[in-house]
Image (tube, rainbow, N blue to C red):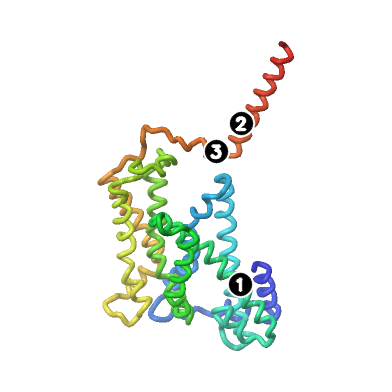
Amino acid sequence: MPFFGVVLFTWALTAADGFGPLLNAPSKPMNGMSTGYLFCYGITAASSAANSLAVNMPDLTRFARNPRSSTIAQAIGLPVALTLTYVLGVALASTSQVLYGQVFWNPLEMIQVWDNRPAKFFAALLFAFAGITTNIAANSIAFGNDLTNLFPRHINIRRGQYICALLGFAICPWKIQKSAATFLAFLNGYTIFLAPLSAIILTDYYLVRHKSGYNVSQLYTPKGLYWYRQGVNWRAVAAFFGGMLPLLPGLIHQINPEVGGITRAYINFSSLAWLDSTILACISYYILFKISPFPTRTDKEDTMAWAIHTKEDDQTLVANSQFERGESSVSKRIE
């Protein structure tokens, strides 16, 4: 798919003799929004894909050989791949105005007007392949893991992924993608459910446990350090709703703009839904921890710490082993 993206990008710029007029066109705010708030709205919509992967990233990075491997993948792979995808979408939308006289916000709509049937077939096949692989990595694995953790006796990861596929059809995604307006509204709106999750994770790690870290063995110990109250950290639950509920009217307005009672000031505020929800959840969780703290350390030794080591630790172990072998051979010669 990356090679096809390069080919599609090159073809569009060559056929249209450049990026087209869309990049030079003046901004025309609609629905009473200013250019600045529309820019914030676009940032939130564009970052929504990264927000989903940021929450689900541990489902994949848990298999990394060392922390450095996961860091490289997240710092380079994710932002670069998403940025190139967005650039390709903008380029196709702009050049379509030159080539076909109208703006195609969805590349698949542009492919439909091609005259070359083999090209249409292979392009559709690659887009289908990209959709399947992206959903497996971004949604299916995480959903399967979550259901496995909730119902380990009845559901494994494979069954959880099958359920995810069925629910994917049940939400009628074709209605979400019927127009650019509904698609952007969905991307901007559902971040209010993802942002509190990432905010709670970051706050818990960097502010609450910044000195203690995590005890790996306690993560797998029933009624251990991370059991909280009956297995539920009520502070995290309260912080999630504290970051989500204030932005919920904005999501309702995006789904149905005809709903009354929502002011223009609030609509402008919800244009940065991800940032607003993140800040609210972060503050809520930290305040609740200060009001009702929970233990972050235990005297019990981390019995799984031996499995967590870096490349430098491996080199040290090899050097010590070679040193011990050298001493052993010298003592044998002396004897």
Say the numbered circle drawn on residue 77.
none
Task: Check disc 2 and give the amino acid type.
Answer: Leu
Point out the residue furthest to the right here.
333
* Up-down relation of residue 240 to residue 40 (above or below): above
On screen, residue 130 versus residue 260, left or right, reads: right
User: Which residue is label 2 attached to?
Assistant: 317
Name the residue located 41 percent from the left edge and 63 percent from the top edge.
274
* Up-down relation of residue 96 to residue 83 (above or below): below
Task: Check disc 3 and give the amino acid type.
Answer: His
Name the residue located 31 percent from the left edge and 51 percent from the top edge.
232
The part of the image, by quadrant, that contains residue 222 is top left
Say the numbered circle drawn on residue 88.
1
**In this view, the mark in front (2 or 1):** 2
- Work out whether mark 2 precedes mark 1 in sequence or the reverse, and give the earlier one: 1
Task: Check disc 1 and give the amino acid type.
Answer: Leu
The part of the image, by quadrant, that contains residue 181 is bottom left
* Up-down relation of residue 36 to residue 215 (above or below): below
Q: Identify the image quadrant of the N terminus.
A: bottom right
Distance CA(mark 2)–CA(mark 1): 48 Å
User: Which residue is label 3 attached to?
Assistant: 309
